[in-house]
Image (spheres, helix red, strand yellow):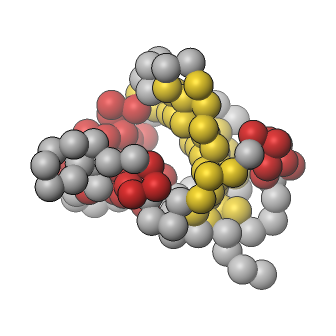
């Protein structure tokens, strides 16, 4: 079966946009792409399609089908609410899919550090992040 990567919802300014990318295999990829591709040469923030490799915008219906029914081939699901500084991550970290909640700024801080496993660092900072 072809790996479809991850699907994600991005909330900002009261609106949601939905994407999927076969290049994003987990939280580490997602955070790295967002951090490394945050701005162009002129310092202007890049749109999501230029930050996340092979990002494809999908419909809200497609997002709910993927996330609610755990469509085969997707390795993770994210919901990022920029205004509320919350990032929900549904990913298998070795014990099956589980839901985690992190402050988005912390995820980006850990992506910026660029050392070691982002999961190890985030869970050390937020040991109660696992919600299910």
| Residue 94, quarter of picture | bottom right
Q: Which of the 4 image quarters holds residue 130?
A: top right
Identified at 69% across, 51% down, the residue is: 58
Viewer-closest of 17 and 112: 17
Where is residue 68? Give x, y as percent.
82, 43
Please report the residue visible at 55 percent of the width from the left and 36 percent of the height from the top.
10
In the image: residue 18, left or right of residue 121: right
**Residue at x-position 75% and y-position 40%:** 60
Residue situated in front as seen by the camera: 37 or 72:
37
- Residue farthest to the bottom, as pictured: 1
Tag count in the figure?
A: 0
Could you tell me which quadrant the N terminus lies in?
A: bottom right
Is 82 situated left or right of 63 in this image? left
Viewer-proximal residue, 48 or 68?
48
Residue for point 13% across, 49% down: 42
Q: Is residue 17 visible?
A: yes
Q: Residue 131: x, y in percent?
A: 64, 31
- Is 36 placed above or below 38 here? below
Q: Is residue 34 above or below residue 128?
A: below
State the image coordinates of residue 43 (x, y, percent, origin top left).
15, 45
Judged left or right of residue 84, residue 43 is left
Q: Check the picture and name the quadrant holding the C terminus.
A: top right
Please provide percent x and percent y for residue 67.
76, 46
Classify residue 60 as left or right of residue 76: right
Residue 129, can we see it? no
């Amino acid at each position: 079966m072809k790996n479809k990567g991850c699907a994600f919802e991005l909330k900002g300014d009261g609106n949601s946009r939905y994407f999927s990318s076969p290049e994003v295999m987990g939280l580490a990829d997602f955070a790295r792409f967002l951090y490394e591709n945050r701005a162009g040469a002129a310092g202007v923030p890049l749109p999501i399609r230029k930050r996340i490799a092979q990002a494809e915008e999908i419909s809200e219906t497609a997002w709910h089908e993927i996330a609610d029914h755990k469509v085969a081939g997707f390795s993770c699901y994210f919901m990022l609410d920029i205004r509320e500084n919350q990032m929900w991550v549904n990913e298998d970290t070795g014990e099956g899919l589980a839901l985690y909640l992190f402050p988005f700024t912390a995820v980006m801080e850990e992506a910026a550090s660029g050392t070691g496993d982002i999961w190890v660092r985030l869970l050390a900072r937020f040991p109660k992040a696992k919600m299910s």
